[in-house]
Amino acid sequence: MIDEKTRAALRSLGLVAGSSVDSRTLNLLGAVLRIQEDPPVPLPFKRIYESMMADNPGSSLTKAWVQRVLKSLVNDRLIRVESEHAYRKMYLADVSTVMAGLEKIRSETIQKLNSQRSVLTQQLDFVTSMDCGSLAENLVEGLTGDRQKLGSRFIKGMDEFYRVTTSTIFDVAKEGDIIRCSVMTFAPYLQGATERVDRVFVAASRGIEVRYSVTIKALIKDGSIRSEITPDALARTIASFIGCRKEGQPIDIRFNDGPKNTYQFMSLNNDSMAFMISENPMTAAWITRSFNPDLIDNAIANFDSQWEKSISLNDLSPEYLKKTGIPPDSYIATTLADVFRTKGDEKES
């Protein structure tokens, strides 16, 4: 007679009403509850056993089994034992003891689920951060003794783009290396950008030169920036670039209003490059120099040519933004103005 909603709650607590074992456990609880008086009075074991046998005629339930199940119900506080230290124990159950027992089981279930969630979260983070390219290289080497290097791979989605560029560019870059990033549109980078940008500052602190080349058209179409990044987060990121630059770290963002770069890409020296093929859905390709040296050399030559003609973030001014078609009241212009105003106030103080 237990309704489905209650049955579902019992299942979640491990008290699965209807299973071969748990149904007999609940039957015993029910047998005790049905013979209680109002108000409840403690009952001897003999009375409980007789009630259980009356509810299950012809069964082979032993007193030892009933004693064992009764003890588990007491341990779970669904049934209260009276005169615990007496020779003959007396048992009592009503809605209050059942509630106390369910509260205990619920608390223990929450603890167990939280523990499982912690383990599952760690496993999820580990699997999510896996780079299958590096894993494949290590596995092949472990199986054959030969190190085979990937020359190219296809990338789907921004999460994978971030993992691949982290493992093949940022993690392997050394002091004196150059990481180039050509940005023709911000849209693919925006989701999670404020968390992912930290790797850029870590690289610069290690003496790796980081160059971001951004087209002015990417700033003019700033609707997507506004929808994904809060003004405070954007201001902090801009201030971090400016601060690192002033501290002498080899990092810069430059803006150009000339011809576009050949590709929207990220590269390490002229050794490897990840370039975007489409934005929606986001697809990209990662290649090494051994796979296509001409493509990498042409992209970097075009990047460096534009880089020399571009203006640094530190030198941006309202006049320059206005000249290139960025409205003074646009999201990026007002944020930049606030950042520079704050920096100016700090300098004066």
Image (cartoon, rainbow, N blue to C red):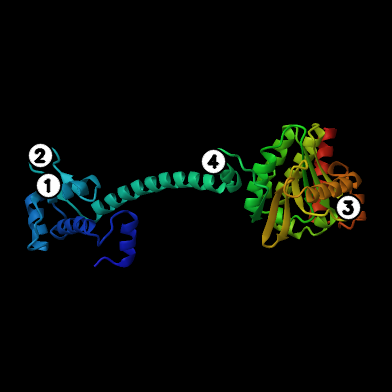
Q: State the residue in front, 325 or 294.
A: 294
At x 15% / y 40%, what residue is drawn? 84
Q: CA distance from mark 2 to mark 1?
A: 9 Å
Residues under numbered marks 4 and 3 in contact, where contact means CB atoms less than 8 Å apart: no
Q: Is residue 226 visible?
A: no
Q: Give the residue type at disc 2.
A: Ala
Q: Give the residue type at disc 1.
A: Met
x and y, in percent, of residue 314 in the image: 85, 41
Question: Residue 246 is drawn in which quadrant?
Answer: top right
x and y, in percent, of residue 167 in the image: 64, 42
Q: Give the residue type at disc 3.
A: Leu
Nearer to us: label 4 or label 2: 4
> Which circle marks residue 86 in the picture?
2
Q: CA distance from mark 1 to mark 4?
A: 71 Å
> Which circle marks residue 144 in the picture?
4
Say which element carries label 2: loop
> Which circle marks residue 90 in the picture?
1
